[in-house]
Image (cartoon, helix red, strand yellow):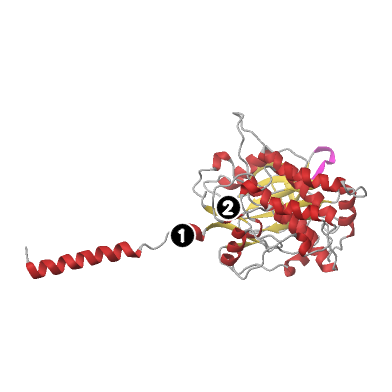
Amino acid sequence: MRGFALPTTLGPYEILRRLAAGGMAEVYLAKARGDAGFEKLVAIKRVYAGHGRSGQPPASLSEEAKLSVSLCHPNIVQTFDLGRAEGAEFIVMEHVEGYDAQQVLDALRLTGTELPVDLGAYVVAEVCRGLDYAHSRVDAAGRRAGIVHRDVSPQNVLLSFGGEVKITDFGIAKTRARGSDPESKVIKGKYFYMSPEQASAKPLDHRSDVFSAGVVLWELLTGRRLHEAPDVRTLLRAVRRAEVPPPSSVRSSVPSALDRIVARATAQSPSGRYPSATAMADDLDAFLASRPDFHGVRGLRTLLASLPAPPASDGPGPLFDLPRTRDRVATVSRAARVTPPEPPLRHGLEEGEPTVLGWQSPSFARPLRVWPWTLSCGVLAVGAAAWALYGP
């Protein structure tokens, strides 16, 4: 059964409001309670009923929790707990009070304004710091864990009212330990932000995330979607070509320095990109250092505070006075987004963005070998005719 009758409880957590939903899971705002009146808002990711087996959390959710809980960085959403209650598997995460980057773009589009270029550079620089921390993690043996997020997108970049930038959702992240899993040749992620090698279901390393960060930067600077296509196959062909025009060709106020950063991050070949996410962050920081009047935290706070909130969807009642959360503009964002009508897509209830969940790449479709069969049949026919005419 999908969804709860709210408010309700899930183990020690009081579920207050649904923030988002996708093909396999949904995210709720919840309140953790403790002794002496202790209360804390958290986000709970709950897998739909039927995805677990033998009473255990699904492998993907368990692996996400185990990976995420090991990541402790200011630019990564923290994971606190993995549990099961009343037939529902869930993970408990830090609640980021604010918006995701896609919601910010949607809200600005509705008001006819654009994200300041300095803020776009600042947001992606912070994302790159978090990514580099994940990419650099080592396992118990001291070897690189080989983490690749694989789903870097504006929807997974959370912006807090306090001016923080955090990347979330390591649910489809690849690690060295998972490199040989049976889905290694299955495309996972959001089509629009994939690297060419990810869109071709080829082996990935951390530079795939660098490419995706470059696409996110392009969209923050221009306020537009990089790729538009009528169907998924057309979209994947465009992604594989990695044709990324300079942001200044869309928005003339974008400085040439940011054009160069985007171009290097989105090079078609991984060897042509930044060697690490921190190298990209360093270039963005150098650009921001040349803008002496810019202050990232203060600028982000001011921008988020100025965004218009839509009418509350929860209606009057005890939830009406909750602090503002990142679903404030979700009710107005879906209509502004165009999603290719393709059966393999999974759509977030509020976000409406396509995520590939186990769709086999066309490049791996096995071609039909017609000519060997034709030749074999021809040889047999000639042999049968010779036998009939000349006998043994």
Residue 373: quarter of image: bottom left
Residue at (70, 50) in percent of width and height: 264
Relative placement, left or right, of 240 versus 37 is left
Name the amino acid type tagged 1: Ala
**How many residues crowd around disc 2 within 10 Å: few (fewer than 14), some, or many (20 or more)?**
some
Residue highlighted by disc 2: 197
**Mark 1 to mark 2 CA distance (whole Å):** 16 Å
Which is nearer the eye, 100 or 254? 254
Residue 42 shows up from this direction = no
Residue at (76, 65) in percent of width and height: 333
Q: Which portion, as a residue range, is magenta? A: 35-40
Residue 140, position in %: x, y? 61, 29
Secondary element type, mark 2: helix
Name the amino acid type tagged 2: Glu
Residue 37: quarter of image: top right
Relative placement, left or right, of 325 versus 141 is right
Which is nearer the eye, 156 or 320? 156
Residue highlighted by disc 1: 365
Residue 132 shows up from this direction = yes
**Is 192 colored magenta in this rendering?**
no
